[in-house]
Image (cartoon, helix red, strand yellow):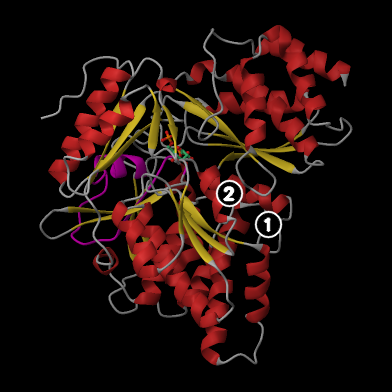
Amino acid sequence: MADVVSNVKKVGLEKYPRQGPRNIQYGTAGFRTRWAEDLDYVLYRVGLLAVLRSKSKGGAAIGLMITASHNPEPDNGVKLIDPFGEMLQQRWEKFATRLANASDTELDSALLEIVEAESISWETQALVCVGQDTRPSSPGLAQAAVTGIRTMGGKVNDYGIVTTPMLHYFVACINNIGSAYSEPTEDGYFKKIITAFKKLRGDKPENGKYVPSVMFDGANGVGAMKLEAGLLHLHDSLQVQLYNNGTGQLNYKCGADYIKVQQCAPVGVPQKSNARCVSVDGDADRIVYYYIDTHDKFHLLDGDRIATLIAGYLMELIKKSDLGLQLGLVQTAYANGSSTSYISKTLKVPVACVPTGVKHLHHKAMEYDIGVYFEANGHGTVTFSDFATRCICSAAEDLSLPADQLHATETLATLMDVINQTVGDAISDMLIVETVLHARGWSIEDWEATYTDLPNRQLKVVVKDRRVIETTDAERVCVTPAGLQDQINMLVKNFPNGRSFVRPSGTEDIVRVYAEADTQASADRLALQVASVVHQLAGGIGSPPVPE
Ligand code: G16
């Protein structure tokens, strides 16, 4: 062990010395920064950490994904994936931050601290699966990570360019997590989810007002590139027209984040009245739907809408199957107030609120037999507990059940195969939404008519140090700087149905402001007023936002 660790330190010093004095933190979605060119040493060290994580898990495969997801093209980042395909355990995030910020000379001792703290058996073989998105800086960063893994004695499975959720899926497959997973290849992934999708719609792709055709905005990232391969499996079951498939700039005026935040259609997708459009982000782990009506008005169907659509359908299947399974839905503070009341009052599904970050939502969702979780930004999936999986699979084979009940359990069992349970997956989520719309015979307008969103607005405030903002109560209440929450409370009182909160982003160097109210003009005004107070009390840089 001593030889390997001292060699790791030597190679680090020679090839990947620490850059600059700036410290970096493992945040909402791993390490992410605007300074992609300075990230080489971080990737080298994350490669080292991934080997330790694999050893600590008895040699199970660990994932290492190089991406900055929804961020602009020059940014980059990395996140680690645990053996079940879930995000890195939170206890290890502090090891990641410590290792990334260690000086070159203390790299060996920082590694040995982790080995000791986690009682890691050095002899255990380690396996790390590496994937990258389409950013120009990704290949160089992948090389740094691979060097780290190999210098530390780990084995590498290099998947090249993949969507983030595909890598999560491959990790779960390699570790053979349950029977729900198949081959850890792109072909295996598409075969599994698309075979199940086609089975659910049978030989009748149309139904009622449902038309099997969508327009797909790929954010000029990996989503459209990979879906092109998936189309070979889809045949006529769903026609997908691909746009923003990599010829333009990544996430620039397109993609799920742009559409959600700007509340407008992306560039690069032709306007076709009432056509169902899908938009994913740069690494295809988020999805939102939209359409433009005959009066040229833009309509957004975001993560809240997707969650309610799926939960409503699952609730029906659970009742019909009579398995007594408990369904729960998980949201964050960004969830539109109308969606939360629709879930609890109309669907009568228990709903929980947790801090931003799929790791928090995933964890909470696992507490239910079937957990649906979605962030309003379109990041989410459905999880099934082992108990629920066993109940559903055995009932689906029980031919003595009444026809209706058997059909509901078979549908649930097949639906499980369409779902990538490891993490939010734009391609799999699209197929789930299409399945529900098809089953209901709904157009996108029918889906939208289930409830009316409260108008809302998101803003960004640039401050000297976003860490001056600390929050509690699932980020709905601001603890510091002193007086900020009182001011927000006072402002909110002036707006019917007003609600607002602020939080430091974990993926960009900014503070996010969210506001909702009874009208769009009020939501815009409230957001601006709150942003102005943040600018004043939290050390804003540049000109403050100007309330009307
Ligand atoms: C990541 C996380 C999401 C989070 C988003 C924004 O998404 O995985 O859970 O909602 O960042 O986070 P923040 O508001 O802290 O910047 P992605 O798609 O960029 O990986």
Q: Which residues are magenta?
A: 256-283
Is 5 contained in the magenta span? no
Is there a contact, CB below 8 Å, between mark 1 and mark 2?
no
**Image quadrant containing the C terminus:** top left
Residue drawn at point x = 51 percent, y = 48 percent: 361
Rendering quarter of residue 490: top left
Q: Residue at x 56, y 28 (%)?
A: 26
Q: In terms of depth relative to the viewer, which is nearer, 376 or 224? A: 376
Of circles 1 and 2, the one toward us is 2
Is label 2 in a helix, a strand or a loop? helix
Residue at the disc numbered 1: 183
The image quadrant of residue 8 is top right
Label 1 crowd bin: few (<14), some (14–19), many (20+), radius 10 Å: some
Can residue 267 be seen from the camera position used here? no
- Side of 309 relative to 58 (left or right): left
Indicate which disc residue 368 carries.
none
Amino acid type at image mark 2 = His
Residue in front for this viewpoint, 170 or 541: 541
| Quarter of the image where the N terminus is located | top right
Q: CA distance from mark 1 to mark 2?
A: 25 Å
Q: Position of residue 511 (x, y in %)?
A: 36, 27
